């Protein structure tokens, strides 16, 4: 599943979910806009950035990174990207936070001591499999949990979230967006199921030939073509990762670009 893409869309359309994850549900989402700024002349792109609107220059910046695999160079790239952003964009905001969202704690590398001065004031880490302390009635946290839920439990959770969305969301547009996000996650989690099978699983008859279904399936077909071209090398990436090799070492062994290796790992 393309987790960074999924979370980008969720945070862009429903930013309240992000602030709920970081324990600041009272922050007004009208204060911020969510973007994915590109760092020019480098291969870096931030997963996402909540930047205050111009009329709120004293509010902090929130740099967002989604990390679902272990990468020994992750924190180097994260802080390099942030400081390059400061150099290129010169934001007026006096404070900032780096928000890293892991699927599980075991995918976090040991924190480099050279960045220890940034740890307490700026870095905030969250682990999706440890969000059990969040209220069970939270629709937003439930959607995030669905991303990492096991396949044998995902269908039931998705159905519960659909029922909750229909009961709680009176705004038709917002309800539709939430249902689309749930559909998208399920389609990605079960790429081999047909539309009819997914509808049966969710007790729905609303997928039809919707944009979200078509885009998700189209991405799946494109990924299949790419896998066909590099099948042997791509199959070796997770094996090398389990053997303890870093992203750089895997790229060197397979003669691939490091960003290509990272992309494959993110899509796993």
Image (spheres, rainbow, N blue to C red):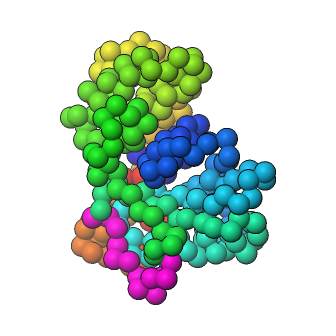
Q: Main secondary structure of the magenta part?
A: helix
> Quadrant of the rendered structure where residue 161 is?
top left
Could you tell me which residue is drawn at 44 percent across and 17 percent down?
A: 166
Could you tell me which residue is drawn at 21 percent across and 34 percent down?
A: 152
Q: Position of residue 162 (x, y in %)?
A: 39, 22
Q: Position of residue 11 (x, y in %)?
A: 55, 44
Front one among 268 and 234 = 268
191 versus 119 height, above or below: above
Disc count in the image?
A: 0
Q: Position of residue 100 (x, y in %)?
A: 45, 61
Front one among 194 and 62 = 62
49 versus 162 height, above or below: below
Q: Is residue 113 magenta?
A: yes
Taking the image as drawn, is residue 11 in sight?
A: no
Could you tell me which residue is drawn at 38 percent across and 15 percent down?
A: 204
Front one among 116 and 225 = 116
Could you tell me which residue is drawn at 50 percent across and 78 percent down?
A: 118
Taking the image as drawn, is residue 247 in sight?
A: yes
Image: magenta residue range: 106-118
Q: Is residue 235 left or right of residue 4?
A: left
**Quadrant into which the N terminus falls:** top left
């Amino acid at each position: 599943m393309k987790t960074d893409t999924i979370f980008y869309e969720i945070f862009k359309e429903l930013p309240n979910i992000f602030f709920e994850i970081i324990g600041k549900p009272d922050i007004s989402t009208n204060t911020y806009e969510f973007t994915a700024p590109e760092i020019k002349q480098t291969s870096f792109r931030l997963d996402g950035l909540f930047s205050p609107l111009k009329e709120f220059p004293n509010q902090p910046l929130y740099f967002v990174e989604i990390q679902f695999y272990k990468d020994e160079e992750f924190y180097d790239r994260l802080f390099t990207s942030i400081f390059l952003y400061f150099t290129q964009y010169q934001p007026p905001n006096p404070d900032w936070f780096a928000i890293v969202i892991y699927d599980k704690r075991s995918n976090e590398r040991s924190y480099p001591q050279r960045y220890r001065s940034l740890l307490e004031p700026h870095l905030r880490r969250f682990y999706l499999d440890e969000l059990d302390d969040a209220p069970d009635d939270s629709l937003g946290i439930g959607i995030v949990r669905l991303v990492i839920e096991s396949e044998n439990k995902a269908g039931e959770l998705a159905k519960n979230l659909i029922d909750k969305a229909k009961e709680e969301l009176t705004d038709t547009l917002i309800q539709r967006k939430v249902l689309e996000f749930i559909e998208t996650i399920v389609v990605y989690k079960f790429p081999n199921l047909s539309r009819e099978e997914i509808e049966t699983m969710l007790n729905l008859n609303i997928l039809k030939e919707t944009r979200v279904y078509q885009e998700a399936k189209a991405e799946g077909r494109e990924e299949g073509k790419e896998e066909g071209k590099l099948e042997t090398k791509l199959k070796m990436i997770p094996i090398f990762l389990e053997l303890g090799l870093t992203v750089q070492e895997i790229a060197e062994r397979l003669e691939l670009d490091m960003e290509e290796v990272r992309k494959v790992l993110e899509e796993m």
